[in-house]
Image (cartoon, rainbow, N blue to C red):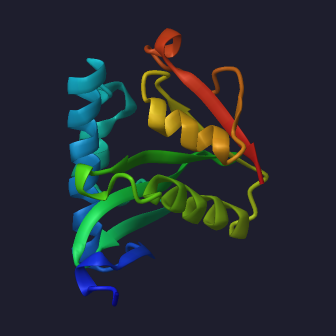
Amino acid sequence: MPVEPEDTLEILRAETAEDIAAVKSLFLYYLTFVTEYLGQDLSFQGTEKEFAKFPETYTALYLAKKGPVPVGAVGLKLLRPEVIELKRLYVSPAGRGLNLGVKLSQAVINEARQLGYDHLYLDTDPGLIHANAIYEKLGFEDIPQYYENPLADQSRYMRLAL
């Protein structure tokens, strides 16, 4: 059976205005999801400034497409000179079950390696079961809190040796 164009999956570095806008939209869906699903407000992370100047705060953005439809995104973000993070991994309902969370994470891992970092950091909520399973599968390990976070007691901090 031939693969139809709407069935093709693609992970790409978001560089065009259209792709960057798609990532921004998916990240905003992610923030809504976190607020509704977990009851957490991530504004302490400077999200208002982040989205007002999007994509300035990111080192790289990756987008997953199913055919022409954007269905997932992730960012690589410099927190401090020695700390680069995987941020805002999100796959929309239309893209779930296609291993896109792993593929997007691997794209960011490869980018961090190419940039010469020794480790890739992230923080997540233990309630995000699928995301936690992806990070564990990829070899991320639990570490102590690495930045100031008012949700510290509800957060999981992880790091991957590159």
Q: Estimate the x, y position of residue 36 in percent, counting from the top left.
A: 20, 25
Q: Where is 151 relative to 13, above or below?
A: above
Is 33 located above or below residue 49 in the figure?
above
Outermost residue toward the bottom in this view: 2
Q: Nearer the viewer, residue 19 or 46?
A: 19
Q: Residue at x 57, y 60 (%)?
A: 108
Identify the residue shown where x is 51% and y is 9%.
153
Q: Residue at x 47, y 46 (%)?
A: 87
What is the x, y in percent for residue 41? 28, 23
Specify whether 49 is left or right of 138.
left
The answer to whether any part of residue 40 appears in the image is no
Q: Which is more toward the observer, 161 or 138?
A: 138
Q: Is residue 44 left or right of residue 119?
A: left
Give the image location of residue 122, x and y in percent: 57, 38
Based on the displayed image, in which of its 4 quarters is residue 132 positioned? top right
Say which residue appears at 75% left-offset and 63% top-offset: 116
- Indicate the position of residue 40 as horizontal and vertical percent values: 30, 20
Quarter of the rendering occupied by the N terminus: bottom left
Q: Is residue 71 left or right of residue 109?
A: left
